[in-house]
């Protein structure tokens, strides 16, 4: 081995290396520091290019958001204009938005069906979440005994719409009443903290009162089943509920809403919601009922209260407006609505 001095081709610093007699020192050898600096320059150049691309994508995204926002504003303006035209052409007076009545003191913890001008209250999703780690809420054990006779659809009406759901439906009720103009043929049933089976059984009891009419039943539930870790039997519950309603009223039209994908940071809960919705879609194909995907509104508006379970005012309005649209179509359109008074 022979020791030779090699100079860096960049900085000129020399160092001694051992090479065999046959080998020759490289003329363009570089010291480790110069090699490191060269690699750093290459990495910085690549990073700079990536930052430029990211900036371009962010600018493009901002422009798309502006376009989307402008389009939404135009759509809202068009809806308001159309609503004014329809109202102006109708012979009947404007039903307006009807405020929910305040329950009596003895009914504050009750659940049940109400007409389009009233609202029921009861245990919230918050209570369900807080109790999830312990025993089942006492309300579940007597849910099947809750009274649904609070609604009495007027005699002589040939159509009936029942919209039943959990406490998120409370946030949708105002928009439903506004769009149906307080039509008494539309009944809203809210069952806070109750599972899908309870919601469907209570809707079925109300359906039995007018079994010979043209009936539409809209079911918005299932989230409590997920929160209580009982969603594994959701498909069986749904199928049985549909069969029971059709036994009572063979011509009933049934609409089932998907379970909202709440923004709770719990992988198991999120997976359970997705699986529950897959089951809803699967049973809908087997039983032949309609499915309304509420997650279209959830993903578009994404508005939840701090508990990340309940809809906020905006999301509740959008979901309620959509559900009410299904009721309006069933009743024959806006002109066929019967405003109170």
Image (cartoon, grey):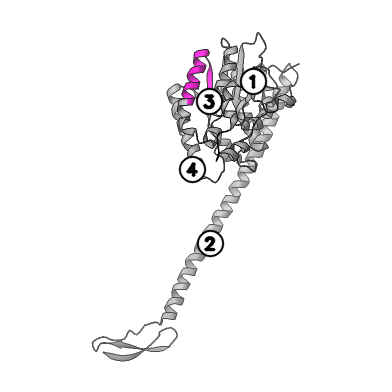
Q: Position of residue 49 (x, y in %)?
A: 50, 63
- Tag nearer the camera, 4 or 2: 4
**Left or right, residue 85 beside residue 199:** right
Quarter of the image for residue 134 reads top right
For marks 1 and 2, the one nearer the N-term is 2
Distance from disc 4 to disc 1, alpha carbons, whole Å, reads 35 Å
For marks 1 and 3, give the one nearer the viewer: 3
The residue carrying pointer 1 sits among few (fewer than 14), some (14 to 19) or many (20 or more) residues within 10 Å by Cα, namely many
Q: Compared with residue 61, is residue 99 higher up or lower down, i.e. above or below?
A: above
Q: Nearer the viewer, mark 3 or mark 2?
A: 3
**Residue displayed at 43% across by 88% down:** 13
- From the viewer's perspective, is residue 295 above or below residue 26? above
* Residue under pointer 3: 197
Q: Nearer the viewer, residue 129 or 271?
A: 129
Q: CA distance from mark 1 to mark 3?
A: 19 Å
Can you give x and y, in whole percent of width and height, for residue 332 in the image?
61, 17
The stretch of residues the image draws in magenta is 237-255
Q: Secondary structure at mark 4?
A: helix
The residue wearing badge 4 is: 268
Residue hosting label 2: 51
Q: Which residue is mark 1?
A: 187
């Amino acid at each position: 081995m022979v020791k030779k001095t090699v100079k860096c081709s960049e900085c000129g610093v020399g160092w001694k290396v051992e090479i065999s007699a046959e080998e020759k020192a490289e003329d363009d050898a570089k010291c480790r520091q110069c090699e490191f600096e060269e690699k750093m320059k290459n990495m910085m150049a690549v990073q700079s290019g990536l930052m430029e691309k990211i900036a371009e994508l962010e600018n493009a995204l901002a422009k798309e958001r502006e376009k989307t926002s402008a389009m939404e504003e135009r759509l809202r303006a068009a809806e308001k204009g159309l609503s004014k035209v329809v109202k102006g052409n109708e012979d009947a007076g404007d039903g307006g938005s009807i405020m929910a009545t305040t329950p009596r003191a003895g009914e504050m913890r009750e659940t049940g069906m109400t007409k389009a001008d009233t609202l029921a209250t009861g245990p919230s999703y918050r209570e369900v979440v807080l109790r999830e780690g312990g025993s089942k809420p006492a309300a579940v054990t007597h849910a099947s005994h809750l009274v649904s006779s609070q609604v009495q659809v007027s005699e002589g009406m040939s159509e009936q719409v029942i919209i039943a759901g959990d406490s998120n439906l409370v946030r949708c009720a105002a928009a439903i009443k506004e769009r149906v103009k307080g039509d008494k043929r539309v009944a809203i049933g809210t069952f806070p903290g109750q599972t899908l089976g309870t919601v469907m059984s209570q809707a079925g009891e109300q359906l039995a009162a007018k079994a010979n009419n043209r009936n539409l039943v809209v079911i918005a539930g299932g989230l409590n089943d997920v929160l209580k870790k009982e969603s594994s039997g959701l498909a069986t519950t749904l199928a049985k509920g549909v069969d029971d309603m059709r036994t009572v009223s063979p011509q009933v039209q049934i609409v089932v809403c998907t379970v909202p994908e709440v923004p709770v940071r719990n992988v198991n809960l999120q997976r359970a919601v997705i699986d529950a919705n897959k089951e809803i879609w699967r049973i809908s194909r087997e039983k032949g009922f309609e499915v309304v995907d509420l997650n279209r509104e959830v993903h578009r508006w994404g508005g939840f209260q701090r508990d990340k379970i309940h809809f906020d005012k905006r999301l509740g309005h959008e979901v309620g407006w959509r559900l009410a649209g299904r009721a309006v179509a069933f009743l024959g359109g806006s002109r066929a609505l019967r405003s109170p008074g």
